[in-house]
Image: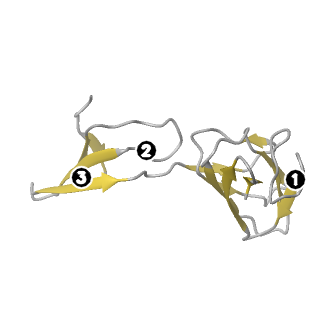
Amino acid sequence: MSTEPILFGTYALLVTQQRLRHGRVGFATDTARLVLRDLLGAFHFFDTLGTIYNTTRIAASPYNVLETDHVIFVDTDGGGIIVNLPAGIEGTNYRVINSGTSGNAVTLTPNGVDQLFKGGAGVATTFYDGEVADIVYNVTEGWM
């Protein structure tokens, strides 16, 4: 277990009992004590419960969603983008946001026999500028 401080702006961030996730932004932790030291040297303690989610930003197609992804911003200004979901695992949650402003679509495609919004096995759905798909996998219902 690492307790080395991580420099974060004007604060030193100390994370204990950490379970790091690989990703572009953020980290995930089951429980952690965040210790921030301000510019005057005073320490501030924050205990966390839950997870700080990884945010991913993409602008190229196709994109295969990773286990470490949670919130996915899809910039469709350069054209439509296909986002391929992995095989569903009970309770897995993704939030996919079309952050484009050019009228291009995100095509969200389930894996193999998985269903997306009860559209049938492997049937994709599209959504446009500003629309969000906040989906959770259930073994009976598929991605909903």
Percent position of residue 86, x then y: 72, 39
Q: Residue at x 49, y 51 (%)?
A: 53
The relative height of residue 117 versus residue 19 in the rendered view (above or below) is below
Mark 3 or mark 2: which comes first in sequence? 3
Give the crowd class for mark 2: few <14, some 14-19, many >=20 residues within 10 Å. Answer: some
Q: Residue at x 71, y 42 (%)?
A: 88
Q: CA distance from mark 1 to mark 3?
A: 44 Å
Percent position of residue 42, x then y: 9, 57
Percent position of residue 130, x then y: 72, 71
Residue highlighted by disc 1 = 124
Three-letter code, disc 2: Ala
Mark 1 or mark 3: which comes first in sequence? 3
- Near-viewer residue (62 or 101): 62
Number of labels in the image equals 3
Residue highlighted by disc 3 = 11
Mark 1 or mark 2: which comes first in sequence? 2
Residue highlighted by disc 2 = 28
- In screen coordinates, is 95 left or right of 62? left
